[in-house]
Image (cartoon, grey):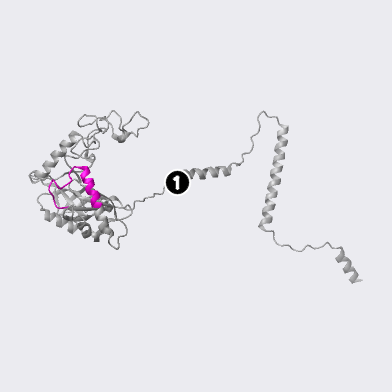
Amino acid sequence: MQQQLLTNQKSTLPPQTTPTAAPTKKILKMKLEKKNTSEDQARASTASAISGITESSTIPPTPVTNNRGWETVKSTGQQKQKNPTPVKLIPTIYPQVEREVSCHFHKQKDNDTPGNDYVARQNTADTALRHVNSALINNKDVIAPPFICARVTVRGTIIFTTSTVQNNIVYEDYKTIIADAHIYYGKCETVEIGKRFSQFLLHRVPTHLSLLEISNSIATNYPQLVQGQTPRWLTPANRRENKTNLTIVMTLTGNIKKSSIGRLNLIVCNRQCQLEDYIAYGRSTQCHNCQVYGHPAALCRNTYCCAVCASPHETKEHLCTLPTCKKGPACTHPPIRCANCNTPHKTSDPNCPERIKIRILTKSTTNNQGDVPMAGVAD
């Protein structure tokens, strides 16, 4: 009997559910989305019922949907690609001064030097470029012509330039070969790799000191500054009389800038001397601000003068009525007027009578008296 009662009780009990595993994240997400959908439908039905009861003259605003989201992203991506960073096909790794090799020759007769004849200088440069490249390419370490261009100065110096990705220091060991390649042109004194010297001004230097004492003081106090030449006074001896402090020109070896020195003042012989950049100029130096000869633009205190029309404005602001004109100094349309000789040509014209007159005067003065270039300090 007891067994029958137990059997009947088990049959009448509700079936027990077996414990199930915890719901996964996917199932929870589906339930949450279903719940949100049902709530949205309920809100929509309530809003439609209310809109049916209430009368309104305006159409209710429709919810803003981002149907153009992909188009916005696409257009934004296209707009970013309109102005990408340009990739230079010919990169410039080394500046101009680090790519030049200068060949200085013994002073020749005036009949032998090209002088101011541009065509003669260009022909000399073409010949020198062929000779030097041919001489260097015969070496096993040089597989291509090293220099891409050459030019000849008025004084007869030939300056070669390497490519934009090559340093001139590479040809330090080839100076003898470069010098011998110019045997047809004359005896080459020196082959200069890059800029050899950098010059600066030192103000408030006591005049009772000798140049040797000044040089030794600079070398002792600042051994990092390697002097290429002995310092010299900026002014001649007759202008140094009865002067307590004056300015010297300090020459350092290499291409050095004032910012790389890291000092605005140097202690020389227990005196604090102001350091400034050396800006050389002479009678033939033409100012690009006022177009007058005799000083550089860095020292100009005059009003602006246009190099195209001689009007009182900067040359870069020169305007032209023709729509196809590039404006500024590139303009070749009238009115064109020289600020120095008042004739219809640009102030920068090399055939300007005033320019030729100053050039002849400067050349004769330099050859006869050996003038030292003047120098000044920019404000």
x 11%, y 49%: residue: 207
**Quarter of the C terminus within the rendering:** top left
Question: Which amino acid does the dot numbered 1 rest on?
Answer: Pro
Q: Is residue 342 left or right of residue 58?
A: left
- Please determine whether, in this image, residue 177 is positioned above or below residue 124: below
Q: Is residue 80 left or right of residue 95?
A: right
**Camera-nearest residue between 72 and 142:** 142
Q: Quadrant of residue 140?
A: bottom left
**Camera-nearest residue between 147 and 45:** 147
Residue of label 1: 84
**Camera-nearest residue between 186 and 27:** 186
- Residue 286 screen position, x and y as percent: 21, 38
Q: Is residue 240 left or right of residue 165?
A: left
The magenta stretch spans which residues? 105-129
x 71%, y 42%: residue: 42
- Residue 297 screen position, x and y as percent: 23, 39
- Please determine whether, in this image, residue 11 is positioned above or below residue 334: below
